[in-house]
Image: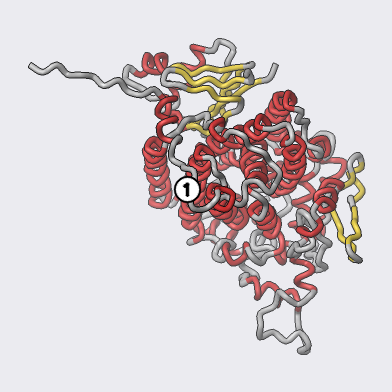
Amino acid sequence: MDTRVLKKKLGLKERYAAMTRGLGWQTTYQPMDKVFPYDTYEGIKIHDWDKWEDPFRLTMDAYWKYQGEKERKLYAVIDAFAQNNGQLGVTDARYVNALKLFIQGVTPLEYYAHRGFAHTGRAFRGEGARVACQMQSIDELRHYQTETHAISHYNKYFNGMHHSNHWFDRVWYLSVPKSFFEDAVSAGPFEFLTSVSFSFEYVLTNLLFVPFMSGAAHNGDMSTVTFGFSAQSDESRHMTLGIECIKFMLEQDPGNVPIVQRWIDKWFWRGYRLLTLVAMMQDYMLPKRVMSWKEAWEMYAESNGGALFKDLARYGIREPLGWKDACEGKDHISHQAWNTFYNYNAAAPFHTWVPSDEEMAWLSEKYPESFDKYHRPRLEHFREQQQAGNRFYNKTLPMLCTTCQIPMLFTEPGDPTKICYRESDWRGNKYHFCSDHCKGIFDFEPEKFVQSWLPVHQIYQGHCFKSDVDPTKEGFDPLLAVLDYYEMNVGRDNFDFEGSEDQKNFAAWRGETKQGDRT
Amino acid sequence: MSNVFIAFQANEESYPIVEAILADNPKAQAVHSPGLVKIDAPDSLTIRRETIEGQTGRPFDLQQLHINLVTLSGHIDEDDDQFTLSWKH
């Protein structure tokens, strides 16, 4: 009888080494620097690429296995949600507006990240880093697809989702996420990893995918919570890649430290500004609330980010320059952003509203220092005007920050009653900023940021009309011409939730009187 | 001292993992919110394969954690038998 010989299985660490090392080679008929032209010009010095280690030690075979399992679980939920008309089970049709912002402004970023990581992986001569970028590139494509599939079900029933890709390249507030990612993908490979993997994924992404998704669950949206957590399970790996990449750069050469610090300063602030949209979604767009933006900021940014920067201090890295201003902003930015969208709702393809008394009481409780004093009076004024038949729509275009592209809605550090304005002069032109940090980012790279495609400037220059439009014709309405260029469905996609088609349809489908009729 | 944390989707596959973490890390605390269970622990947190297998009575590969993992913080040290998060070096 044959004796079965058990071949000793490789341990996790050996398996990882076997699957990620020795995959590259020294080129012979072209110099390595010509094959990998982008991984040195940023000034980052790497002496030993083999020191790159993926802490999860995930290999491609295990990756496909677990990703496949995640997909099966996710699509089971998405199918069940669709088959059971899950959209009727959400708390309130106002909630769907958060999903509109998600498909308009977040989902396209997944696709940018997919492309960014494919490009960045190609740029590195170390195989460990290339394998990690390849996996992340595939993850990001998966997120783009699963989010599109999950939200497409809502698109069958609600307005404001039908042209999300078209809008991403045109609509004013979507230039905020778009310009963030275009800034990142047009940077060098190490800056790209610092921007997306570290500053965005490690320091900030929890704020998007954890409390907001828990909020989706709380509002009866099992489809969104499942794609959100399924995406976030990949994010755990991406966050780990982010911190690994930072440690790798810092450990390879002391000369890398100041370069990395500057990138952390820049990208923490860029990411923080981008999350203004999420702050607003969390405080105003979830009819049933899990936690406030402020609480989420304290849990995931202050306490977790604080631990991280305490740890990185041993390399000589300090907390990002804008950290203190960002922490002060937690009391205000969600309210300031909601006010802005309420103002400009004629030009935004989702609905806004004044929160109910009960919701305002919740905001007072969560923001004892700021809501009643600075933000409630404005909302009550809006409500009064609306009830008198004067729902206010601002038709004057706002000044935008040249760096983050957000309208000038943020206030001075230490004074929430005064709008913050900064400016720089460069080659005979004046540029405007929302903060010291956005100004600082511009001042370091003016050649890059003077190219910003600022929607307001573009509209005023006449670049946001369809080609057959004649602005000299009598009765020409520039705002309507811009909305036509956006391919927005005026009267269905935009304006207040009160009186909207979404509101009426949802009430009719549920056999209720519309929410506006309740006392 | 800084906290580390790990969070999982709240479902049947995650419960034995959460139970094992709470059994192996006496200072760890679980916080439940809709759809999610987050475990915080001072300084470090270890997940042991054997403890999970003891809970479920069947083999467990620690990389199965990826399926229901939502987020985490700290540095990772992982091998076939344990998965540790900490701020240590």
Rendering quarter of residue A292: top right
Look at 71% across and 27% down and name the residue there. A312
- Please name whichever residue, A163 or B63, is drawn nearer the observer in this view of the structure: B63
Q: Is residue A462 above or below residue A232?
A: below
- Residue B75: x percent and y percent? 59, 25
- Residue A22: x percent and y percent? 44, 36
Q: Given the image, on which type of amino acid does mark 1 rest? A: Ile
Look at 46% across and 56% down and name the residue there. A153
Farthest left residue in view:
A1
- Residue A163: x percent and y percent? 56, 66
Rendering quarter of residue A191: top right
Badge 1 element: helix
> What residue is pinned by disc 1?
A138
Farthest top residue in view:
B26
Farthest front residue in view:
A29
Q: In the picture, which quadrant includes the N terminus of chain A?
A: top left
- Residue A363: x percent and y percent? 75, 39
Q: Say which chain tag 1 marks.
A: A
Q: Is there any visible trace of residue A253 in the rendered image?
A: yes
